Amino acid sequence: MNFSGDKIEKMLDLIYDAAAENDLWRHALTAIADLTQSEGGILFGQSVTAGRVYFDFNGRLNEECNDAYQRRHMQNPWSQYMETQAVGRLVQSDEAIPLAELQRTAFYDEVLQPQGVAHNGMMALAARDDFRAAFNMCRSVRRGPFDSDGQRFLEWLSPHLRRSVTLGFRIDGYLAMQHAAFNVLDRLADGVVVLDRKARVLFANAAVRQMAEEGSLRLHQSIATHSPAHSQRLNQLIRGALRGAAGGTMSLPRHLDGRLLTILVAAIRSKDLGRLSDAGMKDAAVLLFVVDPAKRRSIPLGQIMDAYGLTHAEARVALASSSGNTTIETAQSLGLSPNTIKTHLRRVFAKTATARQAELAGLIAAIGSVRIGDMDPEQ
């Protein structure tokens, strides 16, 4: 294999750019396939236990075959073997199962043979609990398994792929917020305000504008409350978020009747991410949720599952725990053991990039604010 310096540099640029722009993964994978004389490649995140693919980026492989894989063949000799392999280790598919034996499986007949694939270079890029992100580079019968040069090249690529995927996970932690909030801002039950790096209001949704009309909030270039003391506290939280702190939570008496509102302040870090400009909010830096408990809705579990990639059981535990219940209280309310609750919470924290229940509560508050059409909440 002849790897020119220019082609490798372009490929590395694509790999790292793909962390922030997922559509570039298919180009990066195609570039790797070209350099290694492969049919194509795919990068995906899945839980074989849950039978769910959370994301997949396809570089020149057949989409119909990929669909057949997701529908019927997630449990296959390759995936089962890779479940126990160390992150970053390149595995040739013939190590998992000889080709002659593989060719006798329905997985080969429906997924591999139609697209001319017989061999695979496989690598786990990230693993946590039952979730694994993996990279596959597929080759034909004629090309055969990767030779020593091809193996060394893919092994050299391993840390680059892993760094990009890890960075992408950090960036994608904001995607749930983007999809759950920015695309349906004026359909939120709770208030949302987006501020730029100078704490100026970029957007205030309908719920917040109603609060401003009632006198609880004041919206001009910046945001304030009807109370100077509460305005000072809010300003402190906003300034902290702008300096890179995690943000915080405060309460505010409603101007009309004194009923407490809750304000959650979170840093967006749009200077680093740049993704929120797609929502028409260039330079967005701080996000505020203004929660009126009297207007809360039961949160559809499907929304939590879609936003953070949780299973049904994990979403139930996340919702129950986010309300401030102890582990024992959550176990009693769901009819589960405390150990089961702890196991689910570990997975929830991993998937939502949170470390404690207070952080989880903030995320659930965000996704719970969304009201989509007349969808009934899932009990």
Image (cartoon, rainbow, N blue to C red):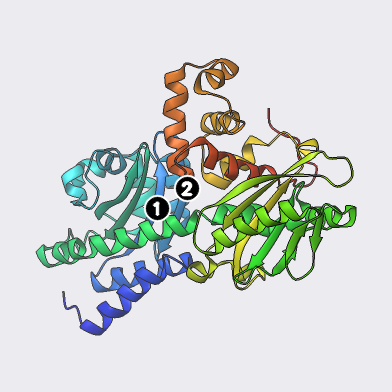
Q: Position of residue 125 (x, y in %)?
A: 30, 53
Is the N terminus in the top left, top right, bottom left or bottom right quadrant?
bottom left
The single residue placed furthest to the front in the displayed view is: 229
Mark 2 falls on what kind of element?
strand
In this rendering, the answer to whether 94 lies above or below 347 is: below
Residue 219 at x, y = what percent?
A: 79, 64
| Label 2 with label 1: CB-CB less than 8 Å | yes
At which x and y percent is residue 298?
72, 33
Nearest the viewer among 235 and 14 is 235
Amino acid at the residue labelled 1: Phe
Residue extending farthest to the left is: 148
Judged from the image, the secondary structure of the residue bearing numbered disc 1 is strand
Residue 44's label in the rendered image is 1
Position of 150 with respect to 115 (left or right) is left
Instruction: Count neighbours of disc 1 (C-alpha within 10 A) and say few if under 14, some if 14 to 19, many if 20 or more.
Output: some
Label 2 environment density (alpha carbons within 10 Å; few <14, some 14–19, many ≥20): some
Residue 54's mark? 2
Instruction: Point out residue 60 in the picture as x, y percentages from the top left corner.
Output: 39, 66
Q: In the visual, does 202 lie left or right of 21?
A: right
Q: Earlier in the sequence, mark 2 or mark 1?
A: 1
Say which residue appears at 89% left-offset and 57% top-offset.
Answer: 213
Q: Is residue 307 visible?
A: yes
Q: CA distance from mark 2 to mark 1?
A: 7 Å
For the question of whether residue 97 can be seen, the reply is no
Left or right side of 51 for 175 = right
Which residue occupies 19% across, 51% down?
A: 89
